[in-house]
């Protein structure tokens, strides 16, 4: 773990505690040094974080990082090997029923019944969660409105698109008015348009219902767009934690300046490399360079000054902010690619898996 990494974790954890103290309420979720072992294999290796009420908190990591295992422990589906998780004020190991009553869970795989209608799927859950009969119809109507599926209430789930089916499951997870909503990869396997529709839905839910959300994802863009804070998990460890902006700022030297000079000369590369804060220069094509720098704004100004001094002109100049992709590479040493995960999505559930 690098020093920068430690800073991010420390800064954020204290930030959360401050926020919770200010609002005079405990965290919605507090996980302390939680471990999950399967035989000799440690799937989760002592992870700690807390989630404030009303927050959308993201667990971001590649396939096999331990995201689902973390969610299963927090939602009482599998026992904790050691450490502690307190959800909605209750210890998952001691007061599982109290936790279950206050949470909604959307598991990773599509789990709505394709042969039942949208409304029937919701109705079963409402009964399962002992929603009083008098409230069931009203709740179902409310959540179907929230996910924009009211007019599809009578449709069999198998006739719906993947994105709509996901929305049925989101509605189903909300039918008993939970305080805390856990979503395991809510948009994996969806096409880009449906994915954005689900994001909009979740943002809408956040602003209209008093919900705390914890979601897992391997989509950088999803974490960036949706989450107030993100924990990057890799090989069962939490490797970084912060707001998307904090995480991006924690990675030095990842600003990218793209500059296109009117005229190519061999000297450009050398000149650019000498500028303050520049860590590397990649020639792209004649006169076109990608400059990696610790300060995009400073380097941009220096490039303009340099061109002026030399009487050269620029065709274009742009600064790109650090992305969460850069952050991920920084903390894990690897790229988080979609291909890597598509294979998992197709993988059937392993039968006989033991918690
Ligand atoms: P993610 O959700 O981040 O893709 P998981 O939490 O599903 O990761 O898995 C983390 C690791 O734990 C993986 O290496 C996975 O193979 C292993 N694992 C998960 N569930 C079980 C189980 N029931 N038995 C043994 N190993 C498991
Ligand atoms: Mg998973």
Image (tube, rainbow, N blue to C red):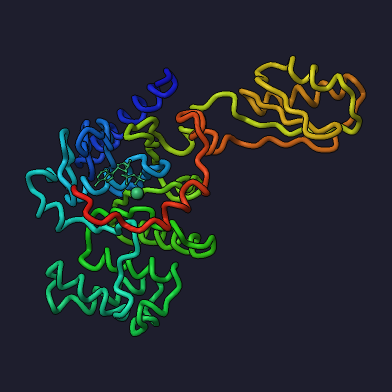
Above or below 66: residue 129 = below
Q: Is residue 50 left or right of residue 129?
A: right
Q: Is residue 237 left or right of residue 196?
A: left
Residues 248 and 235: in front is 235
Query: How many numbered circles are shown?
Result: 0
Residue ID at (24%, 58%): 104
Q: Quadrant of residue 143?
A: bottom left
Residues 86 and 118: in front is 118
Q: Position of residue 92 (x, y in %)?
A: 14, 45
Above or below 22: residue 87 = below
Q: Is residue 72 left or right of residue 201?
A: left
Q: Position of residue 237 (x, y in %)?
A: 33, 32
Residue ID at (21%, 34%): 35
Q: Position of residue 312 (x, y in %)?
A: 90, 26
Above or below 176: residue 266 = above
Above or below 3: residue 300 = below
Residue ID at (44%, 68%): 162
**Quadrant assignment for the N terminus:** top left
Q: Position of residue 215 (x, y in %)?
A: 35, 50
Residue ID at (17%, 75%): 135
Q: Residue furthest bottom?
A: 154
């Amino acid at each position: 773990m690098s020093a920068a990494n430690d800073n991010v974790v420390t800064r954020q954890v204290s930030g959360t505690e401050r926020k919770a103290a200010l609002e005079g309420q405990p965290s919605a979720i507090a996980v302390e040094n939680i471990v999950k072992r399967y035989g000799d294999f440690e799937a989760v290796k002592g992870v700690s974080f807390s989630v404030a009420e009303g927050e959308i908190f993201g667990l971001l990591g590649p396939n096999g990082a331990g995201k689902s295992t973390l969610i299963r422990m927090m939602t009482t589906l599998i026992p904790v090997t050691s450490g502690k998780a307190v959800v909605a004020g209750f210890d998952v190991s001691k007061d599982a029923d109290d936790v279950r009553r206050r949470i909604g869970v959307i598991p990773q795989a599509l789990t709505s019944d394709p042969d039942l209608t949208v409304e029937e799927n919701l109705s079963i859950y409402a009964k399962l969660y002992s929603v009083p009969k008098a409230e069931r119809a009203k709740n179902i109507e409310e959540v179907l409105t929230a996910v924009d599926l009211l007019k599809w209430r009578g449709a069999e789930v198998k006739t719906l698109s993947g994105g709509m089916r996901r929305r049925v499951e989101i509605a189903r997870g909300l039918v008993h008015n939970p305080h805390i909503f856990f979503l395991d990869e809510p948009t994996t396997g969806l096409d880009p348009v449906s994915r954005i529709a689900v994001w909009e839905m979740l943002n809408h839910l956040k602003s209209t219902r008093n919900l705390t959300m914890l979601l897992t994802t391997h989509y950088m863009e999803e974490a960036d767009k949706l989450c107030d804070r993100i924990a990057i998990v890799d090989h069962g460890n939490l490797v970084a934690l912060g707001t998307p902006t904090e995480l991006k700022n924690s990675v030095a030297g990842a600003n990218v300046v793209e500059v296109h000079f009117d005229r190519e000369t061999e000297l450009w590369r050398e000149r650019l490399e000498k500028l303050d804060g520049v860590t590397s220069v990649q020639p792209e094509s004649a006169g076109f360079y990608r400059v990696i720098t610790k300060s995009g704004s400073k380097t941009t100004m220096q490039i303009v000054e340099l061109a002026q001094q030399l009487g050269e002109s620029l065709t274009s100049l742009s600064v790109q902010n650090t992305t969460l992709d850069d952050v991920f590479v920084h903390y894990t040493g690897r790229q988080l690619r979609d291909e890597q995960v598509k294979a998992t999505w197709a993988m059937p559930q392993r039968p006989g898996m033991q918690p």
